[in-house]
Amino acid sequence: MKFLVAWVLMIPVLVTAQSIPRDTSFTVYGTYIKESKGRPYIRVAQPAMPEGVKSKENIIYSTMGNRELSADVFYPAKKSKKGYPAVVMIFGGGWRSGDKSQNVPIAQQLAAKGYVAMTIEYRLSQEAQYPAAVQDVKAAIRWLRANAKQYNIDKSKIATLGMSAGGQLAALAGTTNGIAKFEGPGGNAKQSSDVEAIVNIDGTLAFHHPESVEGKAASEFLGGTYQEKPEVWEEAAPLNHTGKHTPPIIFINSSIPRFHAGRDDMIRILDKYGIYHEEHTLPDTPHPFWFFHPWFEPTVNYTVQFLDKVFKKK
């Protein structure tokens, strides 16, 4: 019940956490009210702890001065001799809003399928502009490796998964494996932040692109418009880092083209290097389809099937 209250019933207001302004205008409840007007059949996918899953909530994974970043970890209760693959989950909200609790329903289902799922808080654009958010993602990956024994994690099998703005961050974290500039000061520096798979759920791959219509939210995140900071807009695009070292990736998309800007260009690069990828477009879907039935189950199923192919058959 505590997850349900925190996750669904949040009222859009500006709040202060650790003296940091936070825009909570992007909520599951608000999105449901908007989308159900045209799709009255949709239902919110609510948090529900599956049997055989444990959790630890509000764990501090990174500390920078007085700023602490927290995460919730869901993991199989049963021990595995080989360890479980792990997934760092990144919420959406235009890099400005959203909350880690919004990923709890999917995290719970991933844990039930044999994955350690870590849904993270990260610094939003009102607090810190690019590249802070992707540095936080990499700090979370390093934290997972540093705590692999406690959560029975196979350190060689870690993925990023993100929705919308979180999808962009998941892809950027994965396509910049090994690039020191993106690491940041988030702790556990001796651990690798590399990932072995990416799950991109309706996240843009290019900010300045014929399919992209990024505007105010991207400008706030990137510290200026494209005209003011073209080099930053290009650097923050996962497409521009895609190459022979990019890990396998799955694209799970709505039927709205702007939210997969750059995907087809990325696929051509992946094909050039023989990198495994999957693409799934759910027809007649709103952008935040992953919050709702009837699309919640296909999103989970596509994700698990992909990760099983990449991780569990090795």
Image (cartoon, rainbow, N blue to C red):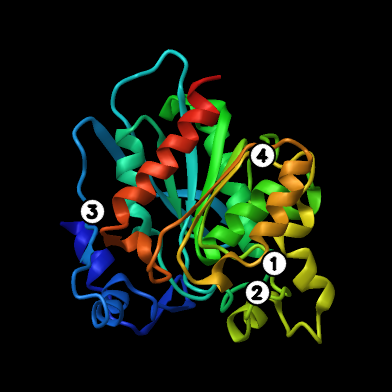
Query: What residue is drawn where x is 63% and y is 48%?
Result: 138
Describe the element under mark 2 as helix, strand or loop: loop
Circle 4 — which element? loop
Marks 2,1: beta carbons within 8 A: yes
Residue 183 visible at all:
no
**The residue under label 3 is which amino acid type?**
Pro
The answer to whether residue 162 is visible is: yes
Q: Indicate which disc residue 247 carries.
A: 4
Query: Which of disc 2 and disc 3 is earlier in sequence?
Result: 3
Query: Can you say whether 155 is above or below 4 in the image?
Result: above
Q: CA distance from mark 3 to mark 2?
A: 34 Å
- Check contact, mark 3 vs mark 4: CB within 8 A: no
Front tag of 2 and 1: 2
Residue linked to disc 2: 211
The kind of residue on which mark 1 rests is Ala
Q: How many angstroms separate mark 4 from mark 2 (CA)? A: 24 Å
Looking at the image, tell me whether mark 2 or mark 1 is earlier in sequence order.
Answer: 1
Within 10 Å of disc 3 (Cα), the crowding (few <14, some 14-19, many 20+) is many
Question: What residue would you read off at disc 3?
Answer: 47
Is 97 on the left-hand or right-hand side of 43?
right
Q: Residue at x 30, y 42 (%)?
A: 109
Residue indicated by mark 1 = 206
